[in-house]
């Protein structure tokens, strides 16, 4: 994830580490290097410009000039500015009264809407919500089956109508069904296109006006970089959305979209997708992302993932075996399998 950007930042920090002091001259060089790294990583030019200006303003202050550890001081400034450009974020979703809360997922074809609908449904279910998914993508014949399968695998009900000719009708019926059956959250998976066009926009506008979602997510493929940001801008102007879910971060070596979306659209990222599995959805936190981009890892998210994939009692059992001197190759194997569940 973001190898290019992280390596470039690490190089900048390393070069500063050799200096006794930060001087206006070596800051200038560091800023040039950071700017180059950002642009190389597909970060939107206006975002790169804003970041550089902010970092420069803070870095030429006397605090850093006097600093003993120039690289540490510079890291702190860059870290703070990344956090500020990524946030702030309010992760809450307004709850409908009376229920159900209607959440619509929009985005281009292949961005990961259907997968993300199921990931989000599972996430909300684990938080105690009674969730239903609605298969309102009729453009691809396999789309309904894809969502139904994900629903069966994860014990989440899916509403679908075979052979319907109107995705809006399916969505409206699905929402009514959820209401009648006392679900408190409905996730509507919509159809996309490979590119933004008139028919997609008018379809989504109609979908929105007929279903009146309480919250709309734009699902964006991080790997498409600048294109993701450009399409986000168009979705914002024409359809509107409340937050972004950025998918496929696991395959994105650059990180341009993650750094640009909030600044360009004014809308923060709520979640990121980090793999194809149902559990590969992570809440987005600017501090953790900044730390990850700068190459200092994201320990908090790792611990959270461990908590959802590893059972406390199993971990306790292995710990007891180890402390009691009973640890053998079978337990070692169990241990490895447990860790493997957490992915890469
Ligand atoms: N590696 C990776 N693949 C993903 C992620 N999210 C979705 N995908 C894959 O992207 C492809 C398209 O996803 P899909 O949900 O069908 O997209 P849709 O057309 O927008 O509904 C599928 O192969 C998914 O498994 C992610 O976070 N990481
Ligand atoms: Mg789909």
Image: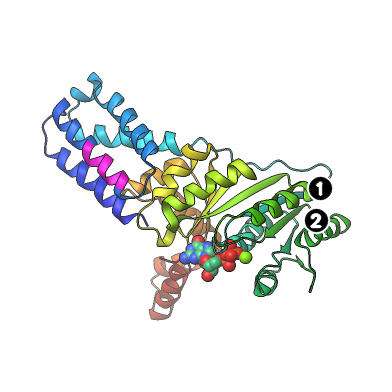
Q: Callout 1: 10 Å neighbours few (<14), some, many (20+)?
A: some
Per the rendered image, the range of residues in magenta is: 32-39
Assess whether residue 267 is covered by the magenta stretch: no
Residue beneath disc 1: 99
Residue at image position (21%, 42%) is 12
Question: Which residue in the structure is indicated by mark 2?
Answer: 183
Q: Is mark 2 within 8 Å of ligand 2?
A: no
Residue 276 visible, this orientation = no
Instruction: Tell me, yes or no, if residue 109 can be seen here.
Output: yes
**Prevailing secondary structure of the magenta residues:** helix
Task: Tell me, yes or no, whether the highlighted magenta stretch contains residue 34.
Answer: yes
> How far is disc 1 from disc 2 in space, using C-alphas?
7 Å
Pick the quarter of the image with the C terminus: bottom left
Task: Give the residue drawn at x 41%, y 72%.
Answer: 336
Q: Is 178 rendered above or below residue 152? A: above
Secondary structure under tag 2 reads loop
Q: Compared with residue 225, is residue 17 higher up or lower down, i.e. above or below? A: above
* Circles 1 and 2 in contact, beta carbons < 8 Å: yes
Q: Is residue 81 left or right of residue 197?
A: left
Please rate how many residues cluster around mark 2, counting C-alpha atoms within 10 Å: few if below 14, some from 14 to 19, many from 20: some
Residue 69 appears at what percent x and percent y? Answer: 19, 32
The percent position of residue 325, horizontal first and vertical second, equals 38, 71
Q: Nearer the viewer, residue 259 or 7?
A: 259
């Amino acid at each position: 994830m973001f190898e290019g950007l992280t390596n470039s930042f690490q190089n900048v920090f390393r070069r500063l580490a050799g200096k006794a002091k930060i001087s206006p001259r070596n800051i200038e060089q560091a800023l040039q290097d950071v700017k180059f790294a950002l642009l190389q990583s597909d970060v939107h030019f206006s975002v790169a410009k804003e970041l550089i200006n902010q970092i420069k303003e803070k870095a030429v202050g006397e605090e850093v000039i006097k600093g003993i550890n120039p690289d540490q001081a510079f890291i702190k400034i860059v870290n703070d500015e990344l956090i500020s450009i990524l946030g702030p974020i309010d992760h809450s979703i307004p709850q409908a009264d009376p229920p159900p809360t209607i959440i619509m997922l929009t985005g281009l074809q292949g961005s990961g809407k259907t997968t993300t609908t199921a990931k989000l449904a599972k996430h909300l279910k684990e938080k105690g919500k009674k969730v239903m998914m609605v298969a309102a993508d009729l453009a691809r014949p396999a789309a309904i089956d894809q969502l139904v399968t994900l629903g069966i695998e994860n014990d989440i009900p899916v509403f679908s109508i075979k052979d319907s000719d109107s995705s809006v009708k399916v969505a409206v019926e699905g929402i009514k069904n959820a209401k009648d059956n006392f679900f408190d959250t409905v996730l509507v998976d919509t159809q996309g296109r490979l590119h933004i066009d008139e028919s997609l926009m008018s379809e989504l506008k109609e979908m929105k006006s007929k279903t009146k979602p309480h919250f709309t997510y734009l699902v964006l493929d991080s790997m498409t970089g600048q294109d993701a940001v450009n399409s986000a801008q168009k979705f914002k102007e024409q359809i509107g959305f409340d937050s972004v879910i950025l998918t496929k971060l696991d395959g994105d070596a650059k990180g341009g979209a993650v750094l640009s979306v909030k600044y360009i659209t004014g809308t923060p990222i709520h979640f990121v997708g980090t793999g194809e599995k149902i559990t590969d959805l992570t809440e987005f936190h600017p501090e953790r992302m900044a730390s990850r981009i700068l190459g200092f890892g994201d320990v908090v998210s790792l611990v959270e993932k461990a908590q959802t994939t590893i059972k406390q009692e199993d971990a306790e059992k292995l710990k007891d075996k180890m402390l009691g001197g009973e640890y053998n190759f079978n337990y070692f194997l169990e241990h490895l399998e447990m860790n493997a569940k957490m992915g890469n």
